[in-house]
Image (cartoon, helix red, strand yellow):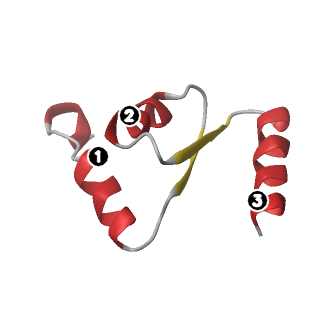
Amino acid sequence: MAQADHPVKWIDCVKTMQEFGADTFVEAGPGKTLCGFNRRIDKSLTSMNVENIESLQKTLDYFKEVR
């Protein structure tokens, strides 16, 4: 509930994850809000959304290819 009345520091979170080597993010749930935020933070990031079986399969296929 804190995020309703406190700022969420998503940019700081993404930058910290990048410092640890993250360059691919998976958003789970309906909508692509965080994927959109990531695109604005750094266009080189790969962001995927899993909200149904089709998008899950697409994401799994992506990870099979990059392994």
Q: Residue at x 38, y 63 (%)?
A: 18
Instruction: Give, as a three-letter code, the residue at label 2.
Output: Phe
The structure residue drawn at horizontal position 16% and vertical position 39%, both measured from the top left corner, is: 7
Identify the mark nearer the N-term, 1 or 3. Answer: 1
Image marks 3 and 2: residues in contact by CB distance under 8 Å:
no
**Crowd rating for badge 3 (residues with CA inside 10 Å; few <14, some 14–19, many 20+):** few
Please provide percent x and percent y for residue 51: 69, 33
Tag 1: Cα neighbours inside 10 Å, few (<14), some, or many (≥20)?
few
Q: Which residue is mark 3?
A: 63
| Residue ranking furthest to the front | 44
Toward the viewer: 31 or 40? Answer: 40
Residue at 29%, 58% in the rendered image? 15
Q: Quadrant of residue 36?
A: top left
Task: State which quarter of the image contains the C terminus.
Answer: bottom right
Q: Which of the 4 image quarters holds residue 38? A: top left
Pointers 1 and 2 in contact (C-beta within 8 Å): yes
Q: Is residue 5 above or below residue 61?
A: above
Question: Residue tagged by mark 2?
Answer: 37
Per the image, label 3 sits on a secondary structure element best described as helix
Q: Which numbered dot is residue 10?
A: 1
Give the SS element for disc 2. helix
Q: Which comes sooner in the sequence, label 3 or label 2?
A: 2
**Residue 39: % across, % down:** 43, 35
Give the CA distance from mark 1 to mark 2.
8 Å
* Quarter the N terminus occupies: top left
x and y percent of residue 45 in the render? 49, 48
Circle 2 packing at 10 Å, graded few (<14), some (14-19), many (20+), is some
